[in-house]
């Protein structure tokens, strides 16, 4: 059965970047393992190893290795081998800081149109984690949405959604219950033919359950969470792109314990658009919102329209990003590019 690449996200931009060659064809990466990719092209699912030239190019820049969501060039050899010869330029890229001491970034997913930050309602949503994930989502270049999963566990999920909207200026907030089949229609609307929705959140947030619901089949394994703390084991240990019936695709990512930010200043400005908007009215352009006179941010806190916790979180994340940006510059490395 022939696969329609346009339903999977192929468009004129990718087509213009692709240089047709003998025995070569484009395909999209469903899953990337060590040295091998599972891809989907016009002829269906194909396993392909990484070409030597691609491995050599990625030796100095691991971000150039293919990841789930990438569009790649496959080459078929007379001996029936298939290799990934190159990665087409990415439209959007979800990048987080790695856990090592070096200032480096890990590409989690590529070419998604929307990033859904998935946070469970039970136990209570973690505001600091949501802010970090939204900054990561904004920085990717995709459109973020906040999904409050397991809405059936709360008496008034819409009330919680209203509270969370204060942490997500300009971001749609949706309460979803797969068990009760509520809110799924709005999520499904984010995955029309040619569009990709990536899910981002901690282990046990319900990402894989949402993928299965959108796919209409149990394509991702799920496990029960601990009722003591609401945490779950890392059921999904890899990034996986799942085509959705009728077109479009959903990209599931492993549960993230630590949300390290790299050079995400622009993402923070979006994630904290409320503070950025207030800062415009401060008397001084370099106001630090501490003891300066005429500070519109501190006036908002005094008036009760902005919380102290929100400002403290903004300061903490900006400091983290400034430190990581300095380390990145000192190391001579560059942030992974699209």
Image (cartoon, grey):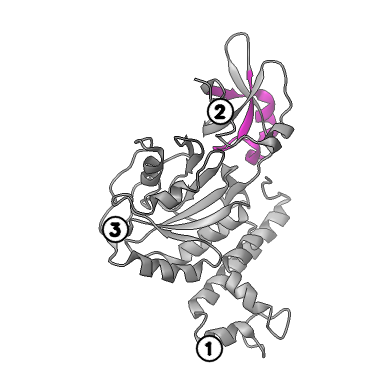
Indicate yes or no whether the magenta region holds residue 57. yes
Up-down relation of residue 173 to residue 163 (above or below):
above
Please name whichever residue, 73 or 48, is drawn nearer the observer in this view of the structure: 73
Disc 2 to disc 1, how far (Cα)? 56 Å
Q: What residue sits right under mark 3 in the picture?
A: 152
Residue 81: numbered disc: none
- For marks 2 and 1, the one nearer the N-term is 2
Instruction: Magenta stretch: give its range.
Output: 46-75
Badges 3 and 2: C-beta atoms under 8 Å apart? no
Query: Is 150 on the left-hand or right-hand side of 277?
Result: left
Residue 302: numbered disc: 1
**Helix, strand, or loop for circle 1?**
helix
Please name whichever residue, 115 or 125, is drawn nearer the observer in this view of the structure: 115
- For marks 3 and 1, the one nearer the N-term is 3
User: How crowded is the residue under tag 3: few (<14 C-alpha within 10 Å), some, or many (20+)?
Assistant: some
Residue drawn 65% across and 36% down? 11
Is residue 208 in sight in this rendering?
yes
Q: Quadrant of residue 55?
A: top right
**Residue farthest toward the bottom in the current orientation of the protein:** 293
Where does residue 291 sit, x and y in percent of width and height? 63, 88
**Residue farthest toward the left in the current orientation of the protein:** 227
- For marks 3 and 2, the one nearer the N-term is 2
Residue drawn 54% across and 37% down? 68
Up-down relation of residue 148 to residue 248 (above or below):
below
Q: Quadrant of residue 216?
A: top left
Please name whichever residue, 186 or 314, is drawn nearer the observer in this view of the structure: 186
Q: What residue sits right under mark 2 in the picture?
A: 4
Numbered disc in front, either 2 or 1? 2
Picture quarter with the C terminus:
top right
């Amino acid at each position: 059965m022939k696969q329609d690449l346009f339903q999977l996200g192929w468009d004129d931009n990718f087509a213009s970047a692709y240089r047709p060659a003998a025995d070569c064809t484009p395909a999209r990466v469903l899953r990337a393992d060590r040295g091998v990719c599972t891809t989907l092209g016009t002829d269906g699912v194909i396993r392909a190893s990484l070409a030597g030239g691609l491995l050599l190019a990625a030796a100095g820049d691991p971000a150039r290795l293919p990841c789930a969501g990438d569009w790649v060039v496959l080459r078929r050899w007379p001996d029936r081998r298939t290799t990934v010869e190159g990665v087409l330029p990415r439209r959007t890229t979800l990048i987080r800081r790695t856990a090592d001491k070096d200032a480096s970034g890990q590409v989690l997913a590529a070419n998604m149109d929307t990033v859904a930050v998935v946070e469970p309602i039970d136990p209570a949503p973690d505001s600091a984690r949501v802010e970090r994930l939204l900054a990561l989502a904004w920085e990717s270049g995709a459109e973020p949405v906040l999904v409050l999963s397991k809405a059936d566990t709360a008496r008034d999920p819409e009330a919680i959604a209203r509270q969370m909207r204060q942490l997500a200026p300009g971001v749609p907030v949706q309460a979803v219950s797969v068990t009760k089949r509520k809110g799924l229609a709005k999520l499904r609307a984010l995955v029309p033919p040619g569009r990709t929705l990536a899910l981002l959140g901690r282990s046990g947030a319900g990402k894989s359950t949402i993928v299965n619901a959108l796919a209409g089949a149990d394509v991702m394994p799920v496990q029960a969470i601990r009722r003591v703390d609401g945490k779950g084991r890392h059921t999904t240990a890899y990034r996986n792109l799942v085509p959705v019936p009728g077109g479009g695709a959903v990209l599931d990512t492993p549960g993230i314990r630590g949300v390290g930010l790299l050079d995400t200043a622009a993402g923070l400005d979006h994630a904290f658009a409320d503070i950025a908007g207030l800062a415009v009215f401060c008397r001084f352009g370099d106001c630090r919102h501490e003891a300066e006179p005429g500070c519109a941010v501190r006036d908002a806190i005094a008036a009760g329209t902005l919380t102290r916790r929100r400002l403290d979180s903004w300061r903490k994340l900006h400091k983290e990003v400034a430190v990581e940006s300095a380390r990145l510059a000192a190391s001579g490395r560059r942030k992974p590019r699209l």
